[in-house]
Image (cartoon, rainbow, N blue to C red):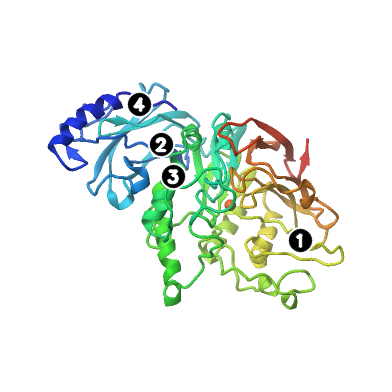
Amino acid sequence: MRRGKGLATLNRLDRRALLIASARIAALTALAPLAGCTAAPAQTKLDRDPFTLGVASGDPLPDAVVLWTRLAMDPLKGGGMGTAPVDVEWRIASDEALKDVVRSGTVTAVADLAHSVHVDATGLAPDRVYWYRFRAGGAESPIGRTRTAPAATASPAALRFAFASCQNYTQGYYTAHAALAKEDLHAVVFLGDYIYEGDARGDRVRDYSRRGWAFALADYRDRYATYKMDKDLQASHAAFPWIVTWDDHEVENNYAGGIDVTDPKNKQAIFERTNAYQAYYEHMPLRGPRPQGPALKLYRTLSYGDLATFHVLDTRQYRSPEIALCADKDETPSGYCAASLDPRRSMLGADQRTWLLSGLAGSKAAWNLVAQSVRFAQQDSSPDPATHRFDGVDNWMGYVVDQRLLLDAFSKVKNPVVLSGDSHVDFVYDVKRDFSDPKSATVATELLGTSISSDGDPFIPQTQFDGSAKNPQLRFFDNHRGYVRCSVERSRLTADFRAVSTVTAPAATVSTTATFVIDDGRPGAHRM
Ligand SMILES: [Fe+2]
């Protein structure tokens, strides 16, 4: 990532303009158009750098990728862009110096969307690296690098991606993003808890700049701005296209969106979701359309030729309300809370469930990667060897009907691999056709990745999550901060669990704590 030139000079010129005009944004003379632009749009000069939040790209298709930025001269105070629309020029090129421009244009950033920009740059070649940059008000953004997906008919030999989640800003520096940005990848998959709402909690290594939280749109916007001002996170975005979904903290801890939006008692929840969903869209490289009230369609598929398809899930927006912690009298002999087994409950909601089941059934991909937020596999948390307890307050164990429908689907699809986050530790699971029977066939593999920073440096004893006789499906546990790097080839998927040495200091080393391999046609992971 490189900085644009000439901001200091522009600031001097603008200071003179500001003596004349009291408004922060003043319409001045038109700038020369970018090379490759077909027109010379009127520009608005800005008195400070508006590219404080970096750039990003996402949702790569064979011929298109979404380019993102948000103008924010005063990022922690609402953006400081006023109410006027601002023209933003963009260009995407096949070379790092941005000389060979293949597409360019101008879009208008509006206050209604926090002056965010989502450009769907189309007409690109498949499986190609591109570089892109924005320009507004005389300032240039950093340069981002991105990559299109292979053609739908292509048979690529390999796909390299990493997945990550849970980046609580106050609990750690983004040393994992610094390392991630240096990897050699086609894409990054982010599985939720991009921000944490509300006041800082737990041990803090850095702080938010202001106190107070009311779930207002301004609160969410300023929170995203805080996170996105981090240079390591910016580097990670600028290096690869991201494929994102969310978990709970983008709205509120452990929220469940499957509620009646017309019920007056849900008024506060609807207020929070409406604001949170809008701010999420404003800050993510999503293709859109923008959310309508408390509704943003996030579930989608993204394919890399016939090698791999990401089935990206939304496990929050449509899920039935979470069950309370199960009292002993509510527990069934199986160890499940009776409410978890209620056939009316759904993790995905009816429409997404139909979409996923038909997408899996019709998939021609060699690898089917189900990218979603929370733990899928069963895990027995009873300390008593003679009894079971399957605590499903927030994960798939609380939504057993949907979990079993997916287990059935996994048994019929090629190489299903569930990618998960949320737990702030690494887990590898054999996903069993029937978890209650250890001899049952393994039908899929779950790779659950640790947090980028949430929960800070490791504190959980390594023995606490031992894959004992009670949990033979659990193949691996590690409690470092980091991310998971995957290489998908036709014959195997290799997952490297990457760990940083610390998140309590701004710099760290990174290493691989374990490598697991899943062979084609043989669900379940094997440690190398
Ligand atoms: Fe989290």
Q: Which residue is mark 4?
A: 4
Q: Secondary structure at mark 3?
A: helix
Q: Which residue is mark 1?
A: 381
> In whole angstroms, how far apart are the C-alphas of marks 1 and 3?
36 Å
Q: Amino acid at mark 3?
A: Thr
Q: Which residue is mark 2?
A: 54
Q: Amino acid at mark 1?
A: Ser
Residue 120 found in image quarter: top left
Q: Nearer the viewer, residue 83 or 76?
A: 76
In which quadrant will I find the N terminus?
top left
Q: Seen from this angle, which residue lies furthest bottom? A: 329
* Image coordinates for residue 157, horizontal then vertical, percent: 62, 31
Sooner in the amino-acid sequence: mark 3 or mark 4: 4
Indicate left or right for 35 with 351 as reference: left
Give the mark toward the camera: 3 or 4: 3
* Image coordinates for residue 188, horizontal then vertical, percent: 54, 39
> In whole angstroms, how far apart are the C-alphas of marks 1 and 2?
42 Å
Q: Which residue is mark 3?
A: 226
Q: Amino acid at mark 2?
A: Gly
Q: Do residues under tags 3 and 4 come within 8 Å of each other at their CB atoms?
A: no
Disc number for residue 504: none
Q: Secondary structure at mark 1?
A: loop
Q: Do residues under tags 3 and 2 come within 8 Å of each other at their CB atoms?
A: no
Give the mark toward the camera: 3 or 2: 3
> In whole angstroms, how far apart are the C-alphas of marks 3 and 2?
12 Å
